């Protein structure tokens, strides 16, 4: 008997749009009361990226219904959730809304922050988002992420904090602590280019760079 398709799940489905052709996840800054970046790929990796960025700015990942007007990363800073969220209400990155409206409201330019400052935030956050996707997708394709859960059944994974796992954790730390994108790119490359004499490390390194930069090595190495 064939399996039945998953039925609609009401509240859960509010967070996962079937149409990903338009942005439906917004990185909202309560401090600025503006959406500072939008994406449409993955809710939980968006939250992961917001967590990495929390050393610089607290962001909420807002799952929203796209308005009739196009909202993208050129104009998302003119928009905010329909119901304002106070800065004191959230102190860690999380998904919003858990209740209430999913609509965005057009607010116009923020009088209390320069557009140039928002563009600077977008540049850093955009890199974190892209690097987060590259890192976790590379991990998933190589099956080296969180190997401790398999150690009981596959002793060959022991010890699970091996060279690959340490590199992954160190890259996460870079994404959390970096000051400039250029610095982060070079620090990540230094980590992932260790032991490229090992075949699986070279594959990992190449795949990560292709996902992040669309080439086998970082662009600054071609300069």
Image (tube, grey):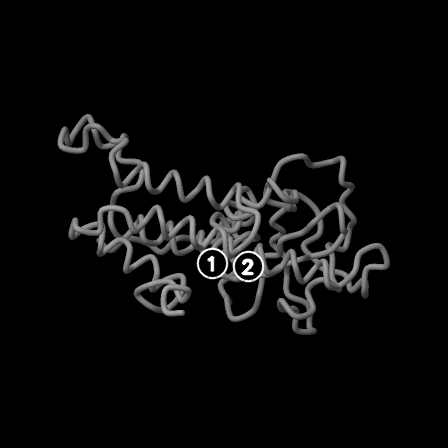
Q: Position of residue 7 (x, y in %)?
A: 43, 53
Query: Cα distance, mark 1 to mark 2?
Result: 6 Å
Residue labelled with disc 2: 126
Asked whether the beta carbons under mark 1 and mark 2 sit within 8 Å of each other, the answer is yes
Residue labelled with disc 1: 130
Give the residue drawn at x 33%, y 64%: 210
Dot label at residue 12: none
Give the residue drawn at x 47%, y 55%: 42
Give the residue drawn at x 14%, y 28%: 155
Q: Secondary structure at mark 1?
A: helix
Q: Is residue 190 left or right of 14 when viewed as pictured?
A: left
Q: Secondary structure at mark 2?
A: helix
Q: Residues within 10 Å of mark 2 (few under 14, many from 20)?
A: some
Q: Position of residue 48 (x, y in %)?
A: 50, 45
Find residue 131 and report its image quarter.
bottom left
Q: Position of residue 139 (x, y in %)?
A: 31, 48
Image quadrant where one finds the C terminus: bottom left
Q: Is residue 201 left or right of 76 when viewed as pictured?
A: left
């Amino acid at each position: 008997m064939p399996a039945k398709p998953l039925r609609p799940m009401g509240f859960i489905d509010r967070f996962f749009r079937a149409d990903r052709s338009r942005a439906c996840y917004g990185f909202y800054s309560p401090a600025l009361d503006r959406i500072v970046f939008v994406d449409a790929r993955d809710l939980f990796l968006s939250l992961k990226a917001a967590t990495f960025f929390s050393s610089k700015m607290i962001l909420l990942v807002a799952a929203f219904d796209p308005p009739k007007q196009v909202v993208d990363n050129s104009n998302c800073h003119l928009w905010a959730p329909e119901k304002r969220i106070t800065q004191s209400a959230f102190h860690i990155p999380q998904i919003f809304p858990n209740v209430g409206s999913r609509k965005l409201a057009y607010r116009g330019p923020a009088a209390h922050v320069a557009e140039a400052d928002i563009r600077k935030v977008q540049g850093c956050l955009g890199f974190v988002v892209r690097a987060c996707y590259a890192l976790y997708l590379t991990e998933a394709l190589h099956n080296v992420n969180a190997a401790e859960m398999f150690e009981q059944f596959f002793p060959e994974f022991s010890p699970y904090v091996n060279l690959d796992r340490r590199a992954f954790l160190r890259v996460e730390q870079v994404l959390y602590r970096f000051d400039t994108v250029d610095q982060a790119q070079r620090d990540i490359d230094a980590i992932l280019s260790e032991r490229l004499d090992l075949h699986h490390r070279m594959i990992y390194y190449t795949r990560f760079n292709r996902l992040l930069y669309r080439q086998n090595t970082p662009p600054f190495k071609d300069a």
